Image (cartoon, grey):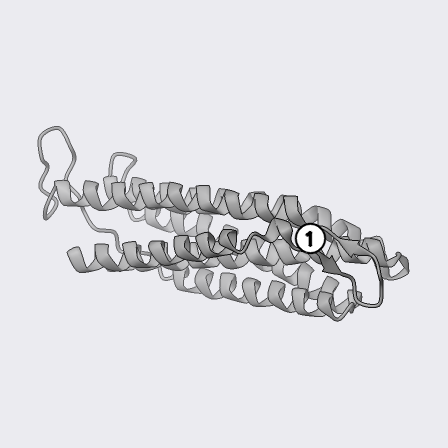
């Protein structure tokens, strides 16, 4: 148990360290130049805002992970302690493995979109960006299916602490992905309107939005890998 807790805390601290290092680089002092243009873009506010937000989200998940282990340790072998129901480990649905692969593919797709954005290949960027969004939607549908599969076993109810934490962790993670899909849909809409004919300033703004989306997707993938490891190991 302590080994698993150490692994979870190590992974969480690694994510927090990456966020702190990113903020120490002071991205708000940096300016970017659009390829082929002398116009400079200052991307301070959105970039700093995203990293601060990710820092807050990291703290939130650290609290949930800590509460998960403390609740699990409060009862042993399914034996109730005081007024608390005993902890009965979950047999996680196999669909979670498929969901994980889908989210990894979504992260790869959005990274490819970012790469093509750097090359100013708007058509390829649009295709991979749309693919990332569709894969993310498939992941969320798969997560809902995992809930249904667990509930259908009849072994767990709303009072089961293991089931409740499973729903809590996956739901909070899913809500953050839904929030990302709101930004994704707005950017995808701009791509559908055909920015091939837009000026370089518009293309530069779009590239920055794709970059921020890629950062957010990679972060949520790391968070899910941490959560998935904990759920499988406990």
Residue at the image position 53 percent from the left and 56 percent from the top: 25
Q: Nearer the viewer, residue 191 or 19?
A: 19
User: Pointer 1: what residue?
Assistant: 209
Residue at the image position 72 percent from the left and 46 percent from the top: 186
Left or right relative to 15: residue 190: right
| Quarter of the image where the C terminus is located | bottom left
What percent of the width, then of the height, locates residue 178? 56, 45
Q: Can residue 25 be seen in this view?
A: yes
- Assign a secondary structure to mark 1: helix
Q: Nearer the viewer, residue 81 or 27?
A: 27
Left or right relative to 103: residue 10: left
Q: How many marks?
A: 1
Q: Can residue 134 be seen in this view?
A: no
Residue at the image position 57 percent from the left and 68 percent from the top: 108
Left or right relative to 107: residue 34: right
Left or right relative to 52: residue 196: right
Quarter holding residue 75: top left
What percent of the width, then of the height, locates residue 132? 62, 60
What percent of the width, then of the height, locates residue 29? 63, 51
Quarter holding residue 117: bottom right
| Quarter of the image where the N terminus is located | bottom left
Decide: is 7 above or below 163: below
């Amino acid at each position: 148990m302590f080994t698993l807790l150490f692994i979870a805390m190590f992974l969480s601290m690694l994510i927090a360290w990456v966020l702190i290092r990113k903020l120490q680089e002071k991205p708000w002092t940096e300016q970017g130049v659009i390829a082929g243009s002398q116009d400079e873009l200052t991307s301070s506010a959105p970039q700093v805002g995203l990293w601060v937000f990710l820092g807050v989200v990291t703290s939130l998940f650290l609290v949930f992970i800590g509460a998960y282990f403390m609740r699990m340790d409060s009862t042993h072998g399914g034996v109730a302690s005081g007024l608390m129901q005993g902890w009965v480990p979950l047999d996680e649905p196999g669909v979670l493995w498929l969901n994980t692969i889908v989210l990894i593919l979504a992260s790869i797709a959005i990274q490819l979109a970012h790469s093509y954005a750097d090359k100013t290949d708007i058509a390829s960027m649009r295709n991979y960006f749309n693919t990332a969004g569709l894969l993310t939607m498939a992941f969320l549908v798969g997560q809902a299916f995992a809930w249904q599969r667990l509930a259908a076993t009849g072994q767990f109810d709303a009072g089961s602490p293991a089931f409740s934490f499973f729903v809590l962790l996956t739901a909070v993670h899913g809500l953050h992905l839904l929030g990302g899909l709101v930004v994704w849909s707005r950017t995808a809409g701009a791509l559908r309107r055909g920015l091939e004919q837009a000026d370089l300033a518009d293309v530069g703004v779009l590239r920055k939005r794709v970059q921020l989306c890629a950062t957010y997707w990679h972060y949520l993938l790391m968070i899910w890998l941490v959560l998935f490891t904990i759920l499988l190991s406990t």
